[in-house]
Image: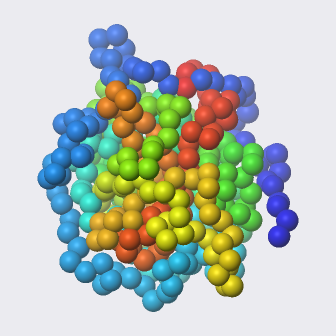
Amino acid sequence: MSSRYLPTSLLLLGLSGAILAGVTASYGDASAKRQCGQTGAGNNADFFAASSPSSKTLLSNPSDLVQEHDHRVSFHERKFPSRRASVGIATDFAIVPTIIGGSKALPNQLCWNAVVFLTAGELTGICGGTIIGARTILTLASCLFDNSNAAIPPQNVTVMLGALDSNPNITAGGCAETYHASRLSVNPAFNLIDVDRENIAIITLERAIDFAYKPCACLACLDDLSPKVGDVCIVSGVGGDQLNNDTNAARPLKWVRQPVLEQSQGRCFWQVDTNGTVTNNFSSSICAGGVVGEDFCYGGDPGGPLVCLDQNKAFYAAGIALDGTLQCAIGVGSQYTKIQNYLQWIRYAALPEDKL
């Protein structure tokens, strides 16, 4: 199938203006400076303690949550059986929670995590996001298109920071806050025919986050780094999509440790056609997870953050939750867009004042 790239008019959605840029290692006013990549609850080492500091969720039998389908069928294919297209918009099938096992987030703990709410007509959806600037959120490009391949306009995108669950009407101790989008910037190499490649986008917020007075919001560092095989990173999310427009069913924000794996068909989710031929080995992505009984699986808020520790023990934005099997916690690693591959574009597309 030939490639079909998005028209230029859809690459930047919303307000026009200069798009240049460049994250600083600290932010906030002189009296309240905070470092990027630092949790707002406890310290970063707590995520890797033998016993998690937050409420542990155990799963006695992961197969209890598995739908009846081949575990090699991806989230995108299951959600859109006639094509591989956008994620985050409600459809008509049941899906399981995003994180199996793992831990519920404490207030301020996952302060770089954003919850992105999308509307397209009567449908609603959720994606994840990563805060990398005062007005800059990273997510998947495919989150920003509806089921008919139409671009979702900025006025139909809101971002909640500091949320501890998926309910947009609930705040976390008065700190959680909703921001409207002013512009949506899609990676120009992304196309809707093959959503597992070049899948990255920027949401520009209408107003800046005041980090000095927002303990529940912080930056993930934007380093020129990617994790090595064997590194252990953290992924977070609030769970499945709003499939029936029921906004009352709140799902908690959770996190789980994800070991980085070597890309291989035996350990990682790869795209395979009906003849068993590999059509995408995700060579430019990060494979992580694959822990039986405790893992991140797809059917929830794609676009969420995979963060890893740098040499200063600060969390940097390493990946964006991209694709994987729908069966959960069965020992198959999931795939993440590798952010390091897109640093030049990110700094070009973000606002100059964010100094990425």
User: Is 188 left or right of 84, judged from the image as shown?
Assistant: right
Q: Relative to residue 339, is residue 148 depicted above or below?
A: below
The answer to whether residue 249 is seen in the rendering is no
Residue in front for this viewpoint, 188 or 264: 264
Of the 4 image quadrants, the one containing the C terminus is: top right
Q: Relative to residue 303, is residue 46 depicted above or below?
A: above
User: Is 255 left or right of 187, judged from the image as shown?
Assistant: left
Q: Quadrant of residue 110?
A: top left
Task: Please name the residue shown 32% across and 32% down the image.
Answer: 313
Percent across and percent down for residue 275 are 69, 85
Colour basis: rainbow
Percent across and percent down for residue 195 are 66, 61
Q: Quadrant of residue 109?
A: top left
Residue in front for this viewpoint, 194 or 175: 194
Task: Please name the residue shown 42% across and 21% down the image.
Answer: 25
Q: Quadrant of residue 11?
A: top right
The answer to whether residue 9 is seen in the rendering is yes
Q: Relative to residue 55, is residue 130 depicted above or below?
A: above
Percent across and percent down for residue 192 are 72, 62
Task: Please name the residue shown 82% across and 45% down the image.
Answer: 8
Residue in front for this viewpoint, 103 or 89: 103
